[in-house]
Amino acid sequence: MKTKYIIPIFALFVFFAVSFQKIQDKPVLYIIGDSTVQNGSGKGADSLWGWGNFMNLFLDSNRIEIQNHAKGGRSSRTFVTDGRWDSIMKTIKKGDYVLMQFGHNDGGALDDTLRARGTIKGIGDESKDIYNPIRKVNETVYTYGYYMRKFANEAKSKGAIPIIVSPIPRNKFDAKGKIEKDQYGGWAQEVAQQTGAYFLDLNQMVIKEYQKMGAEKVKAFFPKDHTHTNEAGAVLNAELVAKGIKDLKKCELKNYLK
């Protein structure tokens, strides 16, 4: 090969090597949660959507990869027992982010024959040994706080950045046109303080927006029940998540906002 061709070929090799390395180094945003974050297959069945499906509208997906791992029906406990968290732990790396929102399904029964997905209320160290009739195994069930701490601490152990998100409110206005703050929102905030994770108070942000809009307008966001939003409602929630990210001090995820 003539010398004059060697340098251009070498330069081309270096270009592709650097480009590949940049792709490999691209951070990943892992989103975990329940059906209010990703409903069903995430394709809008029954006109229902979760906010996680619309984060690409507010984050630059050319610079950060967005993976929505949320799954309908899951609590903080069953996201673990299903093996979903373990699968994320196999690929998560330093510089990645985890947005986590649980609470809607954590209040269920611990060992009923329908779901068996509940967690012990609160953020303490309590546990209870049960027989899980769904999985047909003996299981030790812990508090909501235990599972949320697990997500945050294990993400940090990989060098990733956890962001705990309080659960979106249900469409439940009282006679005075107010929506009560979700108790899981308060517990989520306490876990963030315990673990040093970032905290995004989506519950309060959405409540504030809903109360400003009024019950009649908000009703249009909920075509099926008081929990699951349509596309417009999910986009609003995603926009508020993006606003919350922007307001997080020292959190570099804001650098990937459009």
Image (cartoon, rainbow, N blue to C red):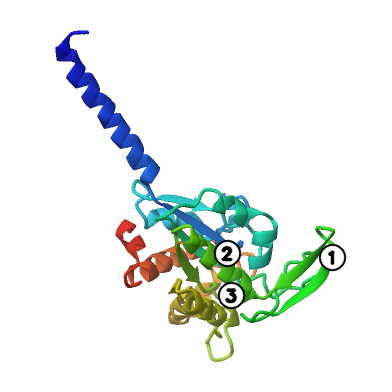
Q: Amino acid at mark 2?
A: Thr
Q: CA distance from mark 1 to mark 3?
A: 25 Å
Residue 129 on image: x %, y %: 80, 72
In this rendering, the count of numbered labels is 3
Is residue 194 something that shows in the picture? Answer: yes
Q: CA distance from mark 1 to mark 2?
A: 23 Å
User: Seen in the image, is 4 located left or right of residue 93?
Assistant: left
Instruction: Work out whether mark 3 precedes mark 2 in sequence or the reverse, and give the earlier one.
Output: 2
List the residue tagged with mark 2. 36
**Which of the two discs, 1 and 2, sits closer to the camera?**
1
Instruction: Work out whether mark 1 precedes mark 3 in sequence or the reverse, and give the earlier one.
Output: 1
Residue 135 on image: x %, y %: 80, 58
List the residue tagged with mark 1. 113
Asked whether disc 1 touches disc 3, contact meaning CB atoms under 8 Å apart, the reply is: no
Q: Residues within 10 Å of mark 1 (few under 14, many from 20)?
A: few
Choose top left, top right, bottom left or bottom right for residue 21.
top left
Q: Amino acid at mark 1?
A: Thr
Q: Residue furthest top?
A: 1
List the residue tagged with mark 3. 170
Q: Quadrant of the N terminus?
A: top left
| Label ID, residue 18 | none
Q: Nearer the viewer, residue 204 or 6?
A: 6
